[in-house]
Image (spheres, grey):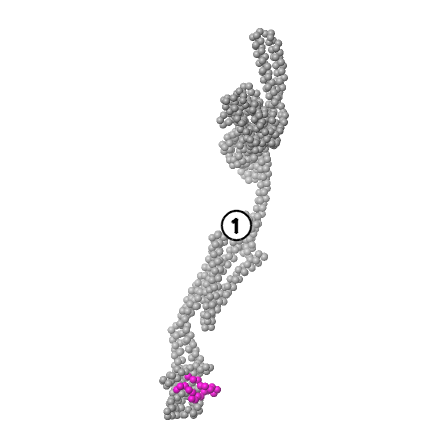
């Protein structure tokens, strides 16, 4: 209600000044029309009124021009409803301007013809005839009074001036003159008789009349007397019979009747007015044309302004509706249109408001559902992200749909390189995943649950994955059964295949731990079983040598000595092997402390410098490495074992046999031993750290196994690989400081492991 009242007040504030301006124009035009018809009465007000009308029309035209400019700008800016406003304004203007122009044309034509009819020849001749008739009547009257005046003059010729007054009075009374005066030729009054006895001085004629009398002896004419109307003035000269006297003048004033005066004035005024208007005929036409044109402009401007106003009023609800529709299209479902009276538009507005209300409710419901789905999705992603098992989901085209973080780490693929690709493309990009891709392709076609152990051979060595897979199928039962998702839409079409879920675990460390435990048990038992008979065998051989060496012939003694020496050497060798078994099987006795790994490497390798072999060891140690929290004796054993293996593998004496590198890859310290031997064969490299794996004739196969065990005891990681040119490399990483307990446990690789391995 308040909104409607506010709009009404705003509407009235906009329209009242315009209506006042139009009313001012109407009043001004009315006065102007009257002033044109009565120019003598209003004088110069026509120009003032024309200026006022022109200013008002300019203001109204400027208002219309501003509205037109606004409309053009709205059309250019593609404001909703602008084109409809243009069409409505054009229609309104056409409907109003056409009849106005027709009326203007015919009115102007009739006006010009009417003015021309005022000045026809017959009217002018009638006025001239009337004027001639009035003049003829006056001339007859003049002749009569002239005769009377001459008769009076004849009767006064013999009368002396002193006695003439009485005679003048009688003659005036008989003739009906209002005044009779006897004057000298110079106009000096000698005697006078007037109907107005209070008048002292007679009415003297003009000098021009006296001159005419002296020249011709007679003057007759119409002269107006102040307050007395028109009079016929007759002046005639008559002789004085006295000897030597100059002629005298007799002036007679004969009044015209009041009716004659009125008719004469009327005819004269009409003729004068007709003459004046005849001279200003074109000016009169121009004035009336100007007035009519101003009325036309007022009508046109008012019609155009009313067209703009009506169009805006009519389009306003549609404009609100378009804006509301666009707001809804942008997602603003809270839009409500103001009520717009009654009728079809009001029903449309009400329907729109009802629609937006329902849309807002539907949007809120959809938002709630979306939030629930999003929460479930986030929950599922959180669960998948925290699973240690790798999870891969495939869609119905066998393209990868989702891969969790554990799967990226286990397979060694980038975070954005799997999703959206097919298994075939993934296998092409990562060749070490070919066995996995082949196994998955084989099982996906069966449409059944499956389980398989798959071996991968990548940059980090052999990797064992325990994989499980199951298909996702839609059923029409409306329930979830296991991994089979169902929906009601499948009721008519039957089960629908969605994709696969593949779950796998990296059991490499577990299998290696089981293998190490088994080999440790074997080594412990072998050490126990081998050590027990070795000492009696060695003692028996030594006793035989001491007892029979001096009693036998020289050649037999030599043979005995050689045999017993061989037995003792082999026993010592077997003791060394048994001790190695014991070391591998024995639980570690760790005594960790902070140590400088560079210093430890230098001290240990110093023992191998300057020997007879001529092997060269090159150190590439990064200075100021972080200190390690480790057991120095165990790490020395690692350096000894790797150095011994590298020197034994060297094939070219006198050249660099071993390169030892140490560097920091925060939060790790990496140590690399690079030899110049023959490297690892493909069959050996994947089992390089397994116990009893050796290619040397006299090797025990426990050197690298013990090294791996010591590295893992310190929370580190070790791997073997062949150099690009020649030889092999053993790379180890140890966490700096006290990080060992945090980074590696039970052989499981953490997510924080840096790239570049």
Instruction: Tell me which segment is drawn in magenta.
Output: 185-205
- Point out residue 181 in the picture as x, y percentages from the top left corner: 42, 87
Q: Quadrant of residue 98?
A: bottom left
**374 vs 477, nearest the viewer:** 374
Residue 237 in the image: above or below residue 53: below
Residue 179 in the image: above or below residue 607: below
Residue 353 in the image: above or below residue 428: below
| Residue underneath mark 1 | 326
Which quarter of the rendered picture does the C terminus lie within? top right
| Number of callouts | 1
Residue at the far front in the pictured view = 610
- Point out residue 231 in the picture as x, y percentages from the top left corner: 43, 83
**537 vs 345, nearest the viewer:** 537
Q: Main secondary structure of the magenta part?
A: loop
Which quarter of the rendered picture does the N terminus lie within? bottom right
Residue at the far left in the pictured view = 216
Residue shown at the point (59%, 7%) measured from the top left: 552
- Point out residue 347 in the picture as x, y percentages from the top left corner: 55, 54
Q: What crowding class fits label 1: few (fewer than 14 Cα within 10 Å), some (14-19), or many (20 or more)? A: some
SS at mark 1?
helix
Does residue 199 belong to the magenta stretch?
yes
**301 vs 461, nearest the viewer:** 461
**130 vs 66, nearest the viewer:** 66
Q: Quadrant of residue 739?
A: top right
Residue shown at the point (54%, 19%) measured from the top left: 697
- Point out residue 200 in the picture as x, y percentages from the top left corner: 47, 86
Q: Does residue 580 appear in this view?
A: yes
Q: Does residue 678 appear in this view?
A: no
Residue shown at the point (52%, 62%) measured from the top left: 17
Does residue 678 belong to the magenta stretch?
no
Q: Residue 354 vs residue 217: left or right?
A: right
Q: Quadrant of residue 255?
A: bottom left
């Amino acid at each position: 209600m308040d909104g409607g009242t506010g709009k009404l007040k705003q509407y009235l504030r906009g329209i009242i000044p315009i209506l006042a301006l139009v009313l001012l124009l109407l009043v001004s035009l009315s006065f102007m029309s009257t002033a044109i018809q009565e120019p003598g009465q209003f004088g110069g007000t026509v120009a003032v009124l024309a200026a006022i009308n022109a200013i008002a029309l300019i203001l109204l035209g400027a208002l219309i021009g501003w509205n037109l400019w606004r409309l053009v700008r709205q059309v250019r800016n593609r404001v909703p409803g602008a084109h409809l406003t243009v069409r409505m304004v054009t229609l309104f203007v056409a409907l109003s301007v056409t009849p106005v122009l027709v009326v203007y044309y015919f009115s102007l034509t009739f006006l010009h013809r009417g003015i021309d009819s005022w000045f026809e020849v017959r009217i002018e001749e009638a006025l001239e005839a009337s004027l001639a008739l009035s003049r003829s009547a006056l001339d007859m009257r003049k002749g009569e009074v002239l005769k009377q005046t001459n008769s009076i003059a004849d009767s006064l010729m013999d009368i002396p001036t002193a006695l003439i007054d009485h005679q003048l009075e009688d003659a005036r009374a008989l003739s009906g003159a209002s005044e009779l005066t006897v004057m000298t030729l110079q106009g000096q009054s000698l005697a006078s008789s007037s109907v107005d006895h209070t008048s002292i001085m007679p009415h003297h004629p003009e000098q021009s009349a006296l001159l005419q009398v002296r020249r011709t002896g007679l003057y007759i004419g119409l002269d107006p007397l102040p307050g007395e109307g028109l009079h016929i003035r007759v002046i005639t000269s008559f002789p004085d019979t006295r000897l030597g006297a100059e002629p005298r003048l007799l002036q007679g004033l004969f009044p015209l009747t009041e009716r004659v005066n009125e008719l004469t004035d009327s005819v004269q005024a009409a003729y004068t007015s007709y003459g004046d208007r005849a001279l200003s005929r074109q000016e009169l036409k121009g004035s009336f044309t100007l007035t009519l044109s101003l009325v036309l402009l007022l009508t046109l401007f008012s019609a155009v302004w009313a067209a703009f106003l009506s169009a805006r009023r009519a389009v306003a609800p549609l404009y609100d509706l378009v804006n509301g529709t666009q707001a809804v299209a942008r997602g603003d479902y809270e839009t409500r249109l103001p009520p717009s009276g009654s009728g079809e538009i009001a029903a449309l507005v009400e329907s729109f408001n009802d629609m937006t209300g329902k849309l807002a409710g539907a949007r809120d419901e959809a938002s709630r559902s979306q939030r629930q789905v999003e929460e479930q999705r986030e929950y599922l992603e959180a669960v998948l992200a925290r699973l240690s098992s790798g999870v891969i989901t495939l869609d119905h085209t066998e393209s990868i749909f989702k891969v969790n973080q554990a799967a990226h780490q286990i397979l060694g693929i980038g975070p954005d390189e799997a999703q959206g690709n097919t298994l075939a493309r993934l296998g092409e990009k990562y060749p070490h995943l070919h066995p996995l891709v082949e196994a998955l392709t084989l099982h996906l076609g069966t449409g059944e649950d499956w389980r398989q152990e798959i071996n991968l051979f990548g940059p980090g060595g052999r990797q064992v994955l325990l994989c499980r897979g199951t298909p996702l199928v839609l059923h029409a039962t409306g329930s979830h059964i296991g991994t089979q998702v169902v929906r009601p839409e499948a009721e008519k079409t039957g089960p629908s295949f969605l994709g696969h879920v593949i779950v796998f675990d990296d059991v490499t460390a577990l299998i290696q731990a089981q293998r190490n435990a088994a080999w440790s048990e074997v080594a412990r038992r072998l050490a126990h079983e081998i050590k027990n008979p070795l000492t009696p065998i060695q003692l028996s051989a030594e006793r035989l040598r001491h007892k029979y060496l001096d009693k036998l012939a020289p050649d037999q003694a030599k043979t005995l000595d050689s045999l017993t020496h061989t037995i003792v050497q082999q026993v010592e060798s077997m003791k060394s092997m048994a001790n190695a078994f014991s070391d591998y099987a024995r639980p570690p006795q760790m005594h960790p402390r902070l140590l400088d790994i560079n210093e430890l490497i230098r001290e240990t390798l110093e023992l191998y410098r300057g020997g007879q072999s001529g092997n060269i060891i090159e150190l590439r140690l990064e200075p100021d490495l972080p200190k390690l929290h480790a057991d120095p004796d165990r790490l020395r054993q690692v350096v000894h074992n790797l150095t011994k293996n590298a020197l034994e593998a060297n094939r070219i004496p006198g050249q660099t046999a071993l390169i030892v590198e140490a560097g920091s890859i925060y939060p790790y310290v990496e140590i690399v031993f690079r030899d110049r031997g023959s490297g690892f064969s493909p069959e050996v490299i994947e089992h390089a750290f397994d116990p009893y794996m050796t290619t040397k004739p006299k090797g025990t196969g426990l050197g690298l196994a013990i090294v791996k065990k010591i590295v893992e005891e310190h929370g580190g990681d070790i791997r073997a690989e062949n150099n690009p040119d020649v030889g092999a490399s053993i790379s180890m990483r140890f966490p700096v400081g006290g990080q060992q307990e945090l980074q590696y446990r039970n052989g499981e690789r953490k997510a924080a492991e840096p790239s570049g391995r």
